[in-house]
Image (cartoon, rainbow, N blue to C red):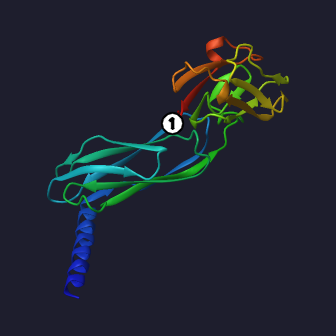
Amino acid sequence: MGKRFTMIFIALSLMSMSQVWAQMLKFDQQLIDAGTMTEDDAPRTYSFVGRNVGGKMLEISRIQTTCGCTKSSVSQMRLQPGDSCKIELTFTPHGYPGTIDTRAFVYLKDSDREPVTKIGLRGMVLPSADVWYRFKYKMGDLRLKQAKVTFNEVTAGMKAEARILCGNSGKKPLKISSLVLPQYAQVKTEPEIIPAGDEADLVITLDVDKIPPMMKPNFTFPIILEGVDAKPSDRTIMVVVNRNQ
């Protein structure tokens, strides 16, 4: 029972000290309305000015944000009484549609277990005008989620299959193929013809029994796609094979 009360007392002491430090570091505002933006917009930076209104030097030890969409920086870490600092929060909207509700917790060296205050942004991010922006790889009009596949722990007798989500961002149907393939690999799309504006699966099949016995257990080979307007290096899928022998 005594140990429990001791822990409660320590926790309350830490909370009260945190509140004391919070009274010494004051910000002109703690929440900024970032308004409305789109995922296509460039990152935006917002400034918060804090001031040491206490009678002793304060040292900011760290700033912890609640979202990978937000990065922080501070103009100076040590604040003598009366000194001010500027904390900047840079918000990147790309990949974060919806409500903006991000926070940054400010910690002091003398109170590093609990934040002394928090600042933040609110607003709204509208979806990108580019419906294909989530498809990172562009090969002419063909857009893909990835440009590399890995077959792990494939064994004799297997016909392994890997799929890449792709789409036709152009105005004409696409028919994708590959003219030069090793005997143990096949590539196709489902559907075979990708209508303009539609998504599809790029399907790569590996026939393990057709891999030449002299090849190393682990190897990589390229698949150069045909049917798209791009140079060979820009329409290549890399395939990694890891075999159990």
Q: Amino acid at mark 1?
A: Pro
The residue drawn where x is 62% and y is 31% is: 146
Residue at far bottom of view: 1
Mark 1 sits on what residue?
43
Residue at far top of view: 231
The residue drawn where x is 26% and y is 79% is: 8
Query: How packed is label 1: few (under 14 Cα within 10 Å), some, or many (20 or more)?
Result: few
Which percent across, then down, holds residue 75? 29, 40
Image-based side of 242 in relation to 178, left or right: left
Q: Quadrant of residue 87?
A: top left
- Above or below residue 175? Residue 55 is below
Q: Quadrant of residue 158?
A: top right
Work out whether residue 41 or residue 161 is closer to the camera in this orientation and state it.
161
Quadrant holding the N terminus? bottom left
Work out whether residue 129 or residue 22 is closer to the camera in this orientation and state it.
129
Image-based side of 36 in relation to 180, left or right: left
Image-based side of 178 in relation to 136, left or right: right
The residue drawn where x is 70% and y is 29% is: 204
The residue drawn where x is 16% and y is 50% is: 80
Which percent across, then down, holds residue 17? 22, 68
How many numbered marks appear? 1
Which percent across, then down, holds residue 153? 55, 37
Which percent across, then down, holds residue 223? 66, 19
Work out whether residue 75 or residue 197 is closer to the camera in this orientation and state it.
197
Work out whether residue 244 or residue 33 is closer to the camera in this orientation and state it.
244
Secondary structure type for disc 1: loop
Residue at far left of view: 56
Q: Quadrant of residue 243?
A: top right
